[in-house]
Each structure stands twice: as C-alpha cells, then as structure tokens.
Amino acid sequence: MWRNIKQQTRNAVRFAAVAATAACLGSPALAQEQPAKVELSGGHVSQLQQIAQERGLNVDDLVAAAKTFTPSGKHDEYITFASGGHSGQIFVIGVPSMRQLRTIAVFTPEPWQGYGFGAGEHVLKGGDLDENHKIRWGDTHHPALSETNGEYDGQFLFIGDKANARIAVIDLKDFETKQILKNPITLSDHGCGFVTPNTDYIIEGGQYANPLGNTYAPIDQFKKAYRGMTTLWKFDRAKGRIDKDQSFAIELPPYHQDLFDAGKGASDGLLFGNSFNAEAAYGAIEKGEAPLEAAASQKDMDYLHVIDWKKAEQLVQAGKVEVINNFKVLRLDTAIKEGAIWFIPEPKSPHGVDVTPDGEFVIVSGKLDPHVTVYSTAKIKAAIASGKIASKDEYGVPVLDFDACKETQVEVGLGPLHTQFDDKGYAYTSLFLDSAICRWTLGGKLAKHGEQPWKVSGKAPMQYNIGHLVTAEGDSASPDGRFMIGMNKWSVDRFFQTGPLLPQNFQLVDISQGGDKMPVLYDLPIGNGEPHYAQMIKADKLKPFDVYPEVGWNPETGTVDPKAPMPGDEKVVKEADGKVHVYSTVIRSHFTPENVEVEEGDTVVWHLNNLEQAPDATHGFCIAGFNINLSLEPGEAQTIEFKADRAGTYPFYCTEFCSALHLEMMGYFQIKPKAAAQAK
Amino acid sequence: MWRNIKQQTRNAVRFAAVAATAACLGSPALAQEQPAKVELSGGHVSQLQQIAQERGLNVDDLVAAAKTFTPSGKHDEYITFASGGHSGQIFVIGVPSMRQLRTIAVFTPEPWQGYGFGAGEHVLKGGDLDENHKIRWGDTHHPALSETNGEYDGQFLFIGDKANARIAVIDLKDFETKQILKNPITLSDHGCGFVTPNTDYIIEGGQYANPLGNTYAPIDQFKKAYRGMTTLWKFDRAKGRIDKDQSFAIELPPYHQDLFDAGKGASDGLLFGNSFNAEAAYGAIEKGEAPLEAAASQKDMDYLHVIDWKKAEQLVQAGKVEVINNFKVLRLDTAIKEGAIWFIPEPKSPHGVDVTPDGEFVIVSGKLDPHVTVYSTAKIKAAIASGKIASKDEYGVPVLDFDACKETQVEVGLGPLHTQFDDKGYAYTSLFLDSAICRWTLGGKLAKHGEQPWKVSGKAPMQYNIGHLVTAEGDSASPDGRFMIGMNKWSVDRFFQTGPLLPQNFQLVDISQGGDKMPVLYDLPIGNGEPHYAQMIKADKLKPFDVYPEVGWNPETGTVDPKAPMPGDEKVVKEADGKVHVYSTVIRSHFTPENVEVEEGDTVVWHLNNLEQAPDATHGFCIAGFNINLSLEPGEAQTIEFKADRAGTYPFYCTEFCSALHLEMMGYFQIKPKAAAQAK
C-alpha cells in the first residue's frame, strides 16, 4: 500500500517537474518572441472600468497594474538584492512584480533555511568577537554584487554588518552565506561592501571611530586615541572566499567615515569615501554640551577621501604595514608619506559618494547642503599630479583644492543622500527632507539625454523620506534605466497599521519617460527588516543551481561530502573519536533509521543526506527540544553535532511539507538515562 | 545650526504626519463613497493593449491585475495571518494586494523587531525546556484569531510550535508576542491553536505520541508507555494571557493526533480532533520493517476524537486529575469513565477536521481517501445519548457507529486535506495530490447556493500541491466568501529560481463566481518561511495602536514602566542591587547620555525610553559587540541587562533610520579594564 502512495506522490512530483521543464523552455522564449496580440473588447473595457470604479482606482493605477502584475509562472526581468538592515539578512525581490522571492539569512540565524540551528554554525562563528561573545544578528546596509570589468557578473554577493564591523560572502549558485569575517581592528562600519571593478577587493568603509584593535580609551582622548579605517578584503574568486591574509586595513583620522565607491574606467585604481565629522567631535549631551548631531555639523566642509588602492596594495605587499590583532594595517603616516591618500573638501555632512558609470565623475551628496557636488576624476588626477596641496588636515593628510577638483554643483533639493544612473546620462538623487527624487543631467560622454548638462530635469515625490535609491544595473558600467526603486524610510499611512512598528516601503518608479514624469508603479511594504541599499541585476545573469550537482553535496565546501551516507550506509555507531555517529538518508517519506538510541552524555554527530534529485524536493530535519532544524535541499548533505545531555524521548521529523505522507516522515531519538545505561 | 536641522527634520515628519491624518480621514471614507467614474479612452485602451502585448499578458491577466493592484496609500480590505512554518514566525499579508505587511516574531529571535536581542527574553524563556535547553526557533502551523460568539474579534492571535509543543499569545494591539508556554507533558503538537467560540480555551492538539512528562521509554514499549494528548489552555482575556494553572491536558491513546476544531453553534461544547495512526505503530525501517508511512497506513479507518470539553472542564474543576510536571492531566480512564470522550471511525489517514459555520456538520478529509466525510452534529449527539457503542478501541475508548454519525460523503479528488467555507454554503477542499481545489455544496441551513447539496460544483488547479486553504473569515460563524488563498507547498517553476531552496506560494483565488470559475488573481512567493495555515479577517476589525498610549510604555506589562526615564532623569548610577543602572532618553537625533562608562565586571541594567509620539517614529538601539538590538517604537520603554565582561570601547547607535541626522545618533559605551579601574 505505501508503495502505491509513494507512486502517487512521485507522479504528482513528476507532474510538477514536467511543468517546470515546459516553463523553462517556454517562458523565456515567449518573452523574446512577439506574443499574441491583445485585443480588449468593449465588454473587457467595461469590466475593467467597473473593477476600477469599485476599487477606487484611476486610469494611471490600471496602467501601473498592467506594468507590474506578473501572472503565475512568468518570471521577473530583474532581481533586486536589498539589504535587510537590522534584520541582518538580504531580501531578494523580483522587478517589476516587486514580490519578495526569498530572504537570504546572513548574520541572523534563520530556521526555515536551516541556518544557525545545527547547520551554518561554522560560518556564523567566523563573525564572533571571541568564544564568549557570540553575535547572532547584524545590521546590513550595502549589498554589492561581484563585478567583471565593472559589470555585474551574477556570481557572488557581499554585505557588511554595520553594528559589529563584519563582512559576509554569499554564493549566488545557491543563495547561501559561505563566509563571515569579523574586522579585527574596529567595531563598526557602514560603507560595506563596494567592489573594485574586477572584484579584486571588497571595500569596507568604517563608521564610528574607535581605538584600533578594539581596546579601551577614555572618550576625552578621542582625537588622539580613536581612528577611522577602511578595509580592503581580498577576494579569491576561484575559492569563492575572502583571503584574510591578503587583506588589509588603512588607518584614517577619526572623522566617522561613511560610504565608499571604487573608481572604474577613468578612475580605476582609486577609492572614494566620505566622512561626516571633520570636527573629530564626540557628543557629550550628558555634560550639557552639544550632542553629536550638532557637534559634528559645525564645519561647512567635510573630507572626501581619495585613496590610491593599487598603491596601497603595493605598500602592503612591500611589507610597509603594522600588524594589529593579526591583521595588516597600513598606518596613516605611511599612506601619507608614500602618496596613497588625499582629501578634498566636500559640502556638509555628506552621505552618498557615487562614481558615474564611466568613472569620469564622482558625485557627493552633502545631506545638509541642497547641492550635489560633482568632482572630475581628470581634475583630481591633475591636482594630485601637480603636487599642489591646499592644506593639510590635523592628521597630516594632504587636502586638494576644492575648486581645482570640482566639475560643478547642481542644486537638487533638501537632504540629498544618494545618486544612481540610467542609460541616457541622467542621474537620480534621493532627497530625504524633500521626500522626493530628483532627476538631473550628467555632462561628459555619458550625456545622451539631449538636454543641457548639470541641470535638474524633473522631480517626483516619494512617500516618505527616501533613503537610498537603486536603478536597474545602476552601479555597473552600463546602467539599464527603465526602473528605479525608492527605498523609503517612513511609510506612515501607506499601508494598514500593523501596530506601532510600521514597515519601510519600496516604491518602484518608471524612469523611462522624461522630465517630472516618474510615476510610482508599485508600493511594496518591507515588514521584515529595514533595507538601506540594494542592487538590481538582470535576472538572466544569474545562473543558480536548481538542485545540487551531486547527491551528498556539502554546500559549505562545494564538493561531495565523503561522509554523506548513501543508501545502505545508514547506521548508528560509536567511532574512534568517542562520539556516536548517526548516518541517515532522507527521501520521501521516511528517514533511515527511524529510531536512534544513544546514552545520556554521548556526543552525537549526525550525518544526513537528502537523496532527492527533483527540483524543490527539500526536506527539513528537526529534533524536538534540541534547537535543531535543517533545510536539506535536493542532494544536500549536512552534519550536526550536539551533546545528548538530557534523558528522554525526542521526536524528529521533516519540517518541510514534502509529500502526502509528510506527517509520517518522523522518528524517535532516544536518550537512555545514564543510570539505565550503566545498569545495562 | 543643529536646531535648524532638527526643525527641518521635524517639518518633514510633520508633513508625513499630516499626510497620515489626511489619509486616515480620507481613504476609508472614499472606500465607502462611490468613487469618480472611470472612463478608459481609446488612447488608454491602446496603451493597456500595448503594455499587455509587450509583457505577454492576456485579458484575464489585466483583469486580475485590476482586482489586486492596490495603489500607494490605499489599504487592503482583509488581513491574513499566516503561520511561518519552521521560520517560527507569523506573516501578516494584505488581501487583495497580497503584500507582506509585516512579520511577527514569535518563537525565533528577530532583531529588526528587537525581539530576543535584549528585549523579549522573558517571553522567549517561557518556552525553554529548562535553563540549559533553550529553544530559539519554532515550527508554527495554525494561527487562531480570538473569537467572540464564534466571530473573529481582532483582539488576540495564538499559534503553536509543532517542533517543541509550545503555544504563543500575540496581542493585536501592537502585533507583539506576549507569552510563550511550553507544554509540560509532551514534546510535539500539531493542531495548535484552535479556539472555543468565546476563546475560553485555546486547543493544542498533540502530534507524535510520547511518554507523558517527556521521559525516556524504549521504542518497543510504544503502545504501553507512549501517549497522545490534547491540551486546553485557559485564556484570561482581561489579562491577555493564558492562565496555566487553569489549563489542563487530556491523555489520549498513542494515535498521533492531528488537527482539531472546536464545535460552535449546534456543536458548542464539543471538540473534534483526528488522528492518523490507529495502528499505534512506529516505523522501524532500520530493522527491515516498514517505515511509518506504511505502518501507519494499514487500516482503512482512523479515529475522529469527540471530546466534551465542558464536561472535561467540570472534571478538572472537581479535582479528578493527575498532576504531571506540575500540570493537570485528565487521564484517559477518567475521561472514558465520566463520559467525556468518544471516537468515531474516519477514513484513512485524515488530516483536516473542520466544523461548518453553524456547527451542524464536521468535515473530515482522509488524505488517502478521495472523499470528504461529513458527520452530523445532531447524529453524533444522538449516538452519544443513545448509549449505543459500536466497539471500544484498544485503550477502552467507546467507538460510535460510523454510519450512525455520518451525514454523507462527497468524492472530491485525490489527497483531500482541508476544508473552508464561504457565505453561500459552498465548501472548498484542498487536494494535495490532484494539486487543485474542489468547490462542493453543503446541505442544511447554510445552503444558499441553489444547487443540489453534497455535490461537487467545480474544480480548479493550483500550482502546486496545495496544503491548507483559507477563505475570508472562513473559520468564523459567518464567512465572507469572495477571496480564497491556496497555500501551496511546491512552487517549482512559478518564480525565478533562487537556488535549490524555493519559496512556497500563495495563490489568491476569486471564489465569487460559480462552478469551475475560480481564477487565480495573484501568485505570491513566500520566501521567508513555510506557511501551513492562515486566517483572514476583515481589516476594520483590527484596532491596533499607532503609537503607545503613553510615553514610557512597557509593551510586556501594558502599563507605563515606573523606571522609564523622562527628560531630566538621565543618569548612570550604581544602585542598591550592586548593578550599574543607565537611564537613557531617546529622541531625534540623540541619546542622552551619549557616553556611558562602566568598569569591567559590572552588571549593567540599561533603561531606555523613546520619547517620540509621532506615528512611525521608531528608534533602534544597538551596542556593538554585545548581541543587543532594540526596536523602540514611539512611546516605548525597554530595559536590558547584561554583563560588561570585556574591556573596550563599544559604539552604540540608533539602527532605525529616523531623521536626516540619524547617523549622528550614537554614543560610546566604555568598559574600563579591571586593572585600570582598580588603580583608580
């Protein structure tokens, strides 16, 4: 009888698999061909009018609906990877449908993905301060797709944790986090990550200055003992991991560094980063002094940091570094002496720094200044080459002349934060205080807009208080235009009230028209985290696995696990390491073995192998009472280790609804009491 | 200067708040009035046709888009609370837009909500096995809204954790989890929760039989030593908490109880629950025997459990209980002897048991039987009253005659799981193996469909393998019809491939038409958990807070925290308890104090109070390196306690982007090394 049921289930799965194949062959092909002509009859028009009237929609709404609605089985054109802010995760969102396709667990354990509940521990441990100070969340801000020649290549994704100065590597073959590293010398970052044009390095810009090496120094020694930093993490693409030994940090003054961007094209080899506390102030409101928000906002100019990273790399390779906490640090004095760092004044409390697609210009938004400031790469290079230094900062960094480096300024509005680009030579700047986006014209070779350069072309409101914005392929050397997402900080009244904690919201904007015409096509609440930045890539650049390449696959090593049990290998055995090893196979709809008994005090190492090879045939594995849950995707093997320190009877079962007899996919894990075991 | 900035920020916020007020006054009112007539001109029609053609949409797609697209600022009509499966959470989804409005963290710590990273620890601890066995995830299956007279009242939400037999209470004033309780006698449940019609009790049906009290018993003593259970958790509505002392469990045979439903109307006072292992089998594939999926599927009939919960309550109040692990258990023998429990045969491996809105019928789906079986409440009561017992099961439970209790059977298709209802007397049953939904006609007083009763009326495919389904107000005494969501287990090819782990998917179905016409209006990927069941409530029944009622509000106690610091109260002081207490106020854009120094080894108790009163003015609070992050919503006070055991300098900052000077909202937490402190 149960074989019949299995057959039925298999048939159902086969049906699904066949449908999958058909769709894979069909859908993208259809998207290329001219689809059948759509004719709306008078009846259809009446029906649409009636629905619109009943639902309070207008004609623009119907158009927006048609531009975004993506029926079952049709896939999105673009995939957006958005940071999840203090959720610690990354959100994967389809464009134009604006559906959240998946969360990628990065810094925070997430049991649906089986991350941090038995599996993934090794990855998470990489981000701990030490054995006794585990960190199991993060504040993700800036996801960065890997690039080849300045173009997104769809292979890897990187993101930083602002709260603890950490960086993570995600492999886009399986959308899983493969590596987390703690920055050894500081405790906070912000501009992380941004990649160099061939992903040689991932840039981690610092944030709040700290005594380097995470030591104690009284706050009144701020200027003397505290330092900023930027870290260049060397990426080994073949291994898909950061090589910590080849990575290094650069010491910076305690100016609260903020966002960074790597030069490309004309500016390849340079790094640009800003900072918002040229006062090197700290707040002391508790002493009746000004809080930091005032103390750090006194000067009219802060410092745009310009770093020659290729020069810095040479200095590091030449051994001109100091080692702090086993990590190479290029000291500021060395960087200055060797000509690897310069500052340029930048207007007031800057936030975003964005290099144009051709690398010719660097755009800085001072959040307390209504302009964006456009710097010319050619002028910066000329200023450096000239050797003319306008001044030096308190820490001896040469400051280039503002006017010598500046191309122009464009008055965009209040609270400009970030700038993105399209395919016609328009730039788009988010305006936090104006709660709007501003479209303005670039000059130079990118200008294909037919308008005067460096002028405001249009403005459109956002609801409310936009932070970042992202355009399709917007950080690459060749942005696509068409779509922009405004990443708004306050939703207030946009959605149904879900208690005092409201979602952030993403507004998808059509930027394919001109001037002020930037209609909001879709308003997506983000109620599971606070995205800051995102990158949007053409979907067809991503080539993920549908199932793991071979049964027994270890997603962490990217190879078949030699200990992954195959059918016939199932057993429970005490091995030479003194631990009880359980070898289990997993297939619809049973585990083998179904009953596992150990003795109280045993250390258990459980090897599981999901033998399935059909797409979507994921199994879960949890043990009641043990804080363990795995997500075993088709072909995946996992090994967990735990102490059986509490006598009792613990059901284990498959947590992923896998077949009609899914509920029967369970067994019992028995821990025989020590007394009973000894009496044996 | 910084005051000007603050003013600008405040203006921006005021703008948002004004917009909010306007929308609150405007939108719902507009929804009531007849909106302006929508006229599509020839130009509009051409535009829609062109968009449709370019995007490969057909006319049905345009209609579905118009029925679901919800423009910025317009709110959804219904709110769906879906379980998050092994994510451990609940997802809040608007209907018809199908946007995920918010995740509610329940069993799994979630830092965006500040749950389990300093705050919420007390709630999470309620679900631990013991001090040394913390559980920080869950497998949520069945959310249950509180009811008054069988109608959803929008006040509370309950959900169980299948993996560890726990129950949680969520207050819909702020959408936060207020209580988690571990079931003291078992380690797994499934049918949790279902409420009695006035929420006197929340029902937790068991799942995998276990030795009661979580003890060890060898698997070969399964029939003798293992037992099922159902637990009735007494809800104290005034306190908004479960009263554990007034709660009790009922011992049941080891049949792997599954879903439950409380009677209502005609069946008020009864509980119905099913079970899928009348064989009382366990799998032993490791011994060459049949796995559980076969061993538990031998008999043609399992047992529908009928429990007189009002009788059981009387027995408990009369002290006829045994206490196991400090929890009242009504033993099976007592329940039998006192006439509180009966069985009725039910066809093969049942899954869903669903009481009709009037309580007249009980519908069981045997997942290995192509029928739904309809039992009549009147006939069950008559059979009980007659005293005629067809047989007794192995454990002495009286078994009523199947035919005497059965109203009818309807052949719906392969793999029927769950049944929901509409306002016309149709029932909707999900078919896992057919990957479809079946619409069929009820008989009795609810039949307003004008068709023959107990007949299949239509069928529609789902993509793929539907588990549960939910209709608008579908478990209440008066379902709304209109919308149904199919909660599908396999998405396979429906969305862009996000690695081997694919989302589940929700399909919104229009059930307002007739027969087979049940078009899918929207296909929503669920890529952050695996929902099992959901309930859908009219949005206007929910009356959440927009901000907390008073500044200094403690969300756990629902009162003002007397220790919440108000302006002027800010200080750092060692109190009589030997701990260093920090009193901080939080307001755009600074913390007071901004610098806090303690000595290595100090225990720190940090009291924070968000003074904001504008909706959406949430602040975060994290301390680098300490695994601490809070979400302080407007008016909210929180207290955290931790050991300052690692000397160093730790930035703290606001993790929620709150103003233009949000990045400046930070301070330093200093831990002076012990040596330095002693030398002082």
Image (spheres, coloured by chain):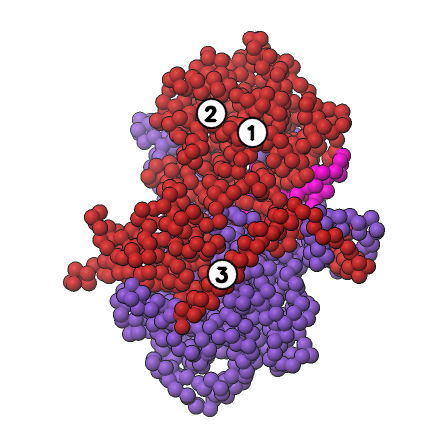
Chain colours: A red, B purple
- Counting from the top left corner in percent of width and height, residue B89 is at 49, 55
**Quarter of the picture holding the N terminus of chain B:** top right
The residue nearer to you, when weighing A353 against B433, is B433
Residues tagged by mark 3 and mark 2 found on one chain of the structure: yes
The residue nearer to you, when weighing B145 against A58, is A58
**Quarter of the picture holding the C terminus of chain B:** top left
Neighbour tally class for label 2: few under 14, some 14-19, many 20 plus, Cα within 10 Å: many
Residue under mark 1: which chain is it in? Answer: A
Q: Which residue is mark 2?
A: A229
Closer mark to the observer between disc 2 and disc 1: 1
Q: Marks 1 and 3, how far apart in space?
A: 42 Å
Please state which amino acid type lies under the numbered disc 1. Answer: Gly
Please state which amino acid type lies under the numbered disc 3. Answer: Val
A447 relative to B189 in the view: left or right: right
Question: Is residue A268 a member of the stretch shown in magenta?
Answer: no
Q: Which residue is mark 3?
A: A13
Neighbour tally class for label 3: few under 14, some 14-19, many 20 plus, Cα within 10 Å: many
Dot 3 and dot 2 residues touching (CB under 8 Å): no
Q: Marks 3 and 2, how far apart in space?
A: 53 Å
B87 relative to A294 in the view: left or right: left
- Res. B295 visible in picture: yes
Q: Secondary structure at mark 1?
A: loop
The count of marks equals 3
